[in-house]
Image: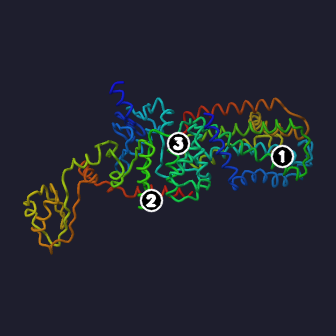
Amino acid sequence: MRSQFAGLYLREVLRTFRNPFVMLMTVVQPFMWLAFFGSGFSKYASQLAAVYGTSNYIEFLLPGVLSTSMLSIGMFGSMSTIQDKRFGFMKRILITPTSKQVIFLSKAFGAATRGLIQIPVMVAAAIVFGVSFHLSALDWAVWVLVLMFAAVGFASMFLAITSSSTDWQTPGVVSNFITMPLMFASAALYPSSGFPGWMQAISEFNPISYTASFGRDLVLGKGIDWLYTGYLAIFAFAMVAIGYFVSARWLKVE
Amino acid sequence: MTTDALAVTSVAIDVRNLSKRYGSAERGVLALDRVSLRIPAGTVFGLLGPNGAGKTTLIKVLTGISDITSGEASVAGFDVRRESLKVRARIGWVAAEVILDDDFSAWENLWLQAKLQDLSDWRERAREILRYFSLDDRRDDKVSTYSTGMRKKLEIALALLHQPAVIFMDEPTIGLDVATRRMLWDIVTGVHKEFGVTVLLTTHYIEEADALCERVGIIDQGRVIAEGTPDELKARVRADLILLETRNGLDPKRIAALAGVEEVRPQGNEWTIRVSSAEAVLPKLLQAVPPEEVRRISVEKPSLETVFLDLTGRRLGQDEPMRDVRKFYMQMRRARR
């Protein structure tokens, strides 16, 4: 099982790093958020420093964009799985002593690893936009860990939902139903304190809110929130467990 | 050891009363209908049948990709259902449409296969196999730059890496040009001799089954309707066919009266004459028919084609040529992705 996981996981990672187009797509999307949404909104946001807790909106936005991009990273895992099904590669994998659960794990962690690329690029972009970071090595490490929890959790969620599908369009459709509500009903782009009750209810459970708030606390100098870290760890483990179970039963080959 | 135990270990694939149904019991499709087969270890076995006969389904079931509806099957001595992982560690698979990781080189494809088969000591064997297939000088090139023949070779190399007991080849030469097909035949025969592996291949090409396979099972509509060596199967028909085309009509009675003629089937000016021996009847036939009357004459010796015709009343590959074309385009698309 270890050997198969190592092989498939490395395959995912190598394929990402060798494909310049995929690399570009991975980095460009969150960068666009910072550049366009961030720049477009920053003038008004800076007038509401009391609400945002900072006069630099990019400072507020960066942790939010990082957390929502962990959500879209999850979609790539299920897209790459469907690609393997369509091109028959899934059959090649399964006509070896490789279990469906191992395939699931390699896809989930492979997608999360892809998400790692975004972190240094986004942080560098934020510095260009005038954000200054005063974080310790531990702060950085736990932040990356928290983002990985989110990425693994969301990737597992997508993989579980699209487990039995072989259709190119499924991840897109599923993603629309999940990404929009989770992204906007979270503290990623603006503070959740102004939400109507029902949106606040979603935000209370939304891992994106926790990931965004965790990062924001760090950037604004409030330190590590271990409670949020714990919540996201539980989210990641629960999603991996669900995906593991679902893929064993429902992962379809073709 | 009893002779019985010996007999058991020398069977590579044992299928007993195997059925596979897709969909519900009422409206589903019965893709395999109580198939029984015993394939001795070390043989090249060909499953010959038209498209949609159930050939690919049988491979899917035996490799563990699809589940069994009823019946039993074992491969390399292990039950396909209960010991699937053990089976999958002992089989190799060559797809109809070449399936490789195009972003990877040949060596990296072999590396991944070794990981999936959990092999620690694979490099020497991989080098050996690449040399055998003359791919060693291109091993670090991305496989997307390979020709179709090279891709096919690499796929067989992947299937051989873990020294499997059985290799499944699903329509190994579908959509290939004549030269590549010949090359592949040589490879299959060579691989079988060199690596001592049992090969189960499916095909709907008569020549392929005849040229390549020591034993052939004829499959039609989910049932194996005959099984044996090509010679055994041909001996069942025990007749030659003379196909004669004339310019004008002939009196069928005159031909039927010739010694050795068993049956005359006229179709306009085309005649199918079933005879015990073409060599004995032809001279007499040519005496009976004036030379200027003969437009075309040919002899069809017993072949797997005539066997299939005899068993089903249809010619192999007569139905649905479209499907073949579709399958071919699918393969091309995948190969070019």
Question: Badge 2 sits on which subunit?
Answer: B
What's the mark number on residue B180? Answer: 2
Which amino acid, by three-letter code, is at mark 1? Answer: Leu
Q: Residue at x 42, y 32 (%)?
A: B77
Residue A29 spot, x, y in % from top left: 75, 52
The image shows residue B226, relative to residue A240, as above or below, that is below
Cα distance, mark 1 to mark 2? Answer: 59 Å
Q: Element at badge 3?
A: loop
Among the 4 quarters of the image, the one containing residue A250: top right
Q: Element at badge 2?
A: helix
Name the residue tied to disc 1.
Answer: A61
Residue A237 spot, x, y in % from top left: 69, 31
- Are the residues flagged by discs 2 and 3 from a single subunit? no
- Are the residues flagged by discs 1 and 3 from a single subunit? yes
Q: Compare residues B222 and B125 and report the one nearer the observer.
A: B125
Contact flag, marks 1 and 2 (Cβ < 8 Å) = no
Cα distance, mark 2 to mark 3? Answer: 30 Å
